[in-house]
Image (cartoon, rainbow, N blue to C red):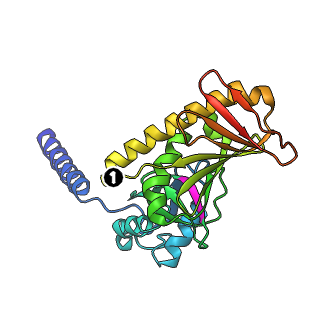
Amino acid sequence: MKKYIITTLNIILAGYFVFAITAFNNPDPIVKKCVKVNIDVADNNTNGFLDAKEIKSILKKNGIYPLGKKLEDVSLRMIENTLKSSPFVNTAECSQTIDGHVQITVTQRSPIVRVKSIDGSDYYIDENGGIMPQSKYTSDLIIVTGHVTKTFAQNSIRPFVQTIMKDELWRNQIVQVNVLENHGIEVVPRVGDHIVFVGYLPAETDATKQVAEIIKFTQEKFDRLEKFYKHGLSVVGWNKYQRIDIQFNNQIICKKHPAKPHPIFLETPSEPTAEEA
């Protein structure tokens, strides 16, 4: 009798293990449908182009929002590719769980400048030189105006603005860049009633060399402007001049506002400054 009971128990245990192994190797989803969609938009507070509502709208518009659909009919690859096609999306990842949840994680492209060209074009340039369309985005970016083409914005303005943004002083001081018809560059500061004429950005046939030259050019020009701010404008006043020309290496030319017509020459510790009426 005892032997019979042991044999029976062994058979039951063997059957249990067979069932457990089979179930483990061939698990059925606990939930057959998508019951929840989790959308995470990274850098939403910094970039602000997209939020969870925008992502949901994109997926619904394309008929692939997964909520309520059978998990076997949810194409994670299609969701990712659809989101990546948005001009504001940098990366998109999608996964699902056996309890019916679909997780969508999106990172945004980072704009560095807004371009409002004289021809009516209005768009953003991202950190890699890509074009992003105008949107409801309202972050405090430098605005580029004037005679600026998309090619010039991507290849020349981008490294110029990126160099400015890396310096804390100029990142807070420069609010606008204006491109003249001859591609001369003006910048408009936040503090001071004047415009600064920087000169002409270097142009090279080799793209890598051009970027390096523009970075060097920008650093040198703004180092000189910083010295003039400290040793010149801090003495005579921030609103005395209407135009400051720093295109030349050996002097800074200042034009006073019309109400102050008497021309003089000022000397700074670093270089001569010419003042025009």
- Magenta stretch encompasses residue 113: yes
- Magenta stretch encompasses residue 5: no
As displayed, is residue 82 above or below residue 276?
below
Identify the residue at image location x=78%, y=38%.
263
89 on left or right of 11: right
149 on left or right of 28: right
Q: State which quarter of the image contains the C terminus.
A: top right
Depth check, front residue: 114 or 26: 114
Q: Position of residue 25 (x, y in %)?
A: 21, 55
Q: Position of residue 236 (x, y in %)?
A: 80, 29
230 on left or right of 80: right
Picture quadrant of residue 83: bottom left
Q: Main secondary structure of the magenta part?
A: strand
Q: Position of residue 203 (x, y in %)?
A: 40, 52
Identify the residue at image location x=54%, y=48%.
199
Instruction: Tell me the element at label 1.
Output: helix
Depth check, front residue: 103 or 231: 231
235 on left or right of 156: right
Query: Which residue is labeled 1 in the image?
Result: 207
Q: Position of residue 196 (x, y in %)?
A: 65, 45
Q: State which quarter of the image contains the N terminus.
A: top left
Q: Is residue 100 visible?
A: no
What span is in magenta? Answer: 112-116
Sort mark 1 into few (<14), some (14-19) or many (20+) by Cα contacts within 10 Å.
Answer: few
Residue type at tag 1 = Ala
